[in-house]
Amino acid sequence: MITAASRRVMTWTGRRIRPRDDTPTARSFDAVAVGGAWRIDDLSAPPTAVTIEGADGVTVAALDVADVVCLPRNREGWQPIDQIRIRPGATSPTAGQVIVVTGVWGWPAIPADIQQAAIETACEWLKLRQALSEPSPDQFEPGTPPIRDLPWIARNLLLPYRRLGVV
């Protein structure tokens, strides 16, 4: 039940809320800047490498990581890097190109309110499940709960972490 609630939390926030994975890996992102910055997945620490590739997958430029500004600049200890900006004068990607970021992905620490939102969701689903089923000794059997939305208390806890998509 808690796993399903955690997945629902990630779906609603539009983020991969996972502990950091200490193995650096590369991820690719379309070169679409919003407000001069490129949105990336949640990066636990500054990237170890950033390259720009053409649509054909051929590397166009390898950036010096000193030319990459990690945002938000003033992060809390738990807060991941979720955008990058390239300093003026460095090679910037153009439309149709791809930014490849290599680094340690995940959250430095999962905030307590995100954990609490998953717990509140699982508890609410259990209450609804109990109310909708006949009393039986095996009422709390593991299994997939019916698809339900997040309770309001969970939404309120998660609102600061929500990433809205662009249509």
Image (cartoon, helix red, strand yellow):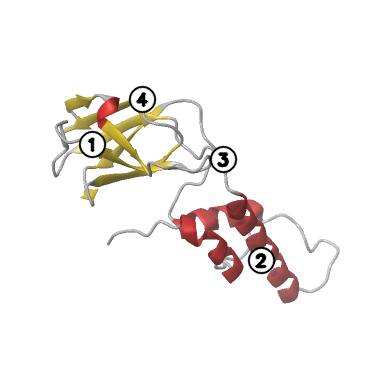
Residue located beneath label 3 in the image = 109
Q: Which residue is rendered at x = 63% and y = 62% of the image?
A: 121
**Badge 4 amino acid:** Thr
The answer to whether residue 4 is visible is: no
Task: Determine the CA span between mark 3 and mark 4.
Answer: 20 Å
Residue located beneath label 4 in the image = 48
The answer to whether residue 127 is visible is: yes
Q: Considering the image in quadrants, where does the C terminus appear?
A: bottom left
Name the quadrant containing residue 145: bottom right
Residue located beneath label 2 in the image = 125
- Left or right: 44 in relation to 145: left
Query: x%, y% of residue 101?
Result: 32, 32
Residue located beneath label 1 in the image = 86
Foreground residue among 20 and 87: 87
Point out the tag, 3 or 1, that comes first from the N-terminus: 1
- Location of residue 14 with respect to 89 vertically, above or below: below
- Location of residue 114 with respect to 40 vertically, above or below: below
* SS at mark 2 in the image: helix
- Left or right: 10 in relation to 46: right
Q: CB of mark 1 within 8 Å of CB of mark 2?
A: no
**Badge 3 amino acid:** Ala
* SS at mark 4 in the image: loop
- Left or right: 153 in relation to 72: right
Query: x%, y% of residue 100?
Result: 28, 33
Task: Determine the CA span between mark 4 and mark 1.
Answer: 14 Å
Q: Which residue is rendered at x = 71% and y = 65% of the image?
A: 126
**Badge 2 amino acid:** Trp
Nearer the viewer's eye, disc 2 or disc 3? Answer: 3
